[in-house]
Image (tube, rainbow, N blue to C red):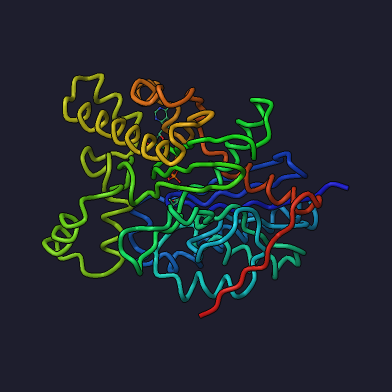
Amino acid sequence: MTYKIMVLNTGSTSTKMAVYFDDKKVVQREFEHTKEFLEKYPYMADQLPMRQELADDFMREAVAEYGAFDAIVARGGILPPIHAGGYEINDVMVDYLLNVCAEEHASNVAACIAFELRRKYDIPHAYIYDGISTDELEPVARISGIPDMPRVSVTHCLNMRATAHRAASEMGRAYGDCTFIIAHLGGGISMSLHKKGLIVDVVGDDEGPFSPERAGGQQVIQLIKYLVRKNKTDMRDKLRVMRGDSGLFGYLGTSDARRVEQMIAAGDEKARLVYEAMALQIAKFIANLAASVCGKADAVILTGGLAHSKMLTDEIERRIGFIAPVKLYPGENEMESLAHGAYRILSGSERARVFRYDK
Ligand SMILES: Nc1ncnc2c1ncn2[C@@H]1O[C@H](COP(=O)(O)OP(=O)(O)OP(=O)(O)O)[C@@H](O)[C@H]1O
Ligand SMILES: CCCC(=O)O
């Protein structure tokens, strides 16, 4: 039997959908949303009807072409801490994402759309997989310094965990036997430490290096003073400082690293300084995770779109090559990772969990 799987990924600048038969991609479509276009939606939830309509159109065409689907799988949003792997999307999860979650993130609407498509097209299952709030931190990694504000794990878990499995398999080893430090270098940057099959420590996108469009970790007192000075009053304004308006974009007016490299090649010294600073910060936070395992890692893995950049990866490797061999897995493979997760659940090698939330 062949499983038909619809994949849905709502990103900050696009809505991507794909049809998979088992673990093979049949077709993918990407709907781009420009920054200017999205400006008219004050909150992420406001984008729901627009993205829902796009997804519905694609779903309708896909059902007409391929018949009924067995599952739809969506990128998980900012949920309370969850386990790695798959969860069945239920009304509790949708209610949390729409009405409880205070943090804006493009992936928050994916599960809501998938739940509705499941109902409308009578699809037996709707899942999220390796959601961004996957949290397997060791107790020692939870201690933040503020007793009633423990560290949480919010990362590009989907790509990093899939990449860790791929690297282990290419090394002829079981994932659970490897220790990897993984850096997802995308529009946002986050990192994770994989040990004995668990993600035991992380560097979140708001505590690590700055990235093409995000601020990364800051000197906290300076940040508080800055937000007050700039009169950033509501949560959305504050979050835009952290995610969207900062990083390469804030300094150089572009979040496209390829453009930044062209600027450097043309002799732009500011672009060179900022790009070098980003590489240095990435290297420092990789070393930060190395401390958690006393430097005993099997590999440092660089993934995400920026891992295509030789200028950047060479500079990172120059600084942290002493920790472990550096492996490159450029790109983000999110659609494939979602589809493969759903396929493993449908074919019985993994089980989907039930999402619960106690108010
Ligand atoms: N060949 C390349 N050389 C240098 N940089 C590249 C290359 N290809 C992509 N990038 C850069 O990678 C970054 C985007 O990475 P990616 O596509 O993984 O991020 P995203 O999906 O937009 O965001 P996120 O990963 O936070 O969800 C951009 O800065 C882009 O310019
Ligand atoms: C760091 C949170 C994951 C994401 O932004 O995609």
User: Residue at the location (74% across, 48% down)?
Assistant: 343
User: Relative to 178, is 318 above or below?
Assistant: above
* Relative depth, front residue between 336 and 302: 302
Seen from this angle, which residue lies furthest left?
Answer: 229
Seen from this angle, which residue lies furthest bottom?
Answer: 359
User: Relative to 220, is 159 above or below?
Assistant: above
Q: Is residue 351 left or right of residue 315?
A: right
Quadrant in the picture for residue 234:
bottom left
User: Relative to 166, is 43 above or below?
Assistant: below
* Relative depth, front residue between 116 and 346: 346
Q: Position of residue 184 (x, y in %)?
A: 45, 39
User: Residue at the location (47% across, 43% down)?
Assistant: 192
Q: Is residue 214 left or right of residue 323?
A: left
Q: Position of residue 237 (x, y in %)?
A: 26, 63
Q: Quadrant of ligand 1?
A: top left
Number of callouts = 0
* Relative depth, front residue between 214 and 256: 214
User: Residue at the location (46% across, 50% down)?
Assistant: 155
Q: Position of residue 266 (x, y in %)?
A: 22, 20
Q: Is residue 21 left or right of residue 266?
A: right
Q: Position of residue 65 (x, y in %)?
A: 76, 50
User: Residue at the location (49% across, 47% down)?
Assistant: 156
Quadrant in the picture for residue 240:
bottom left
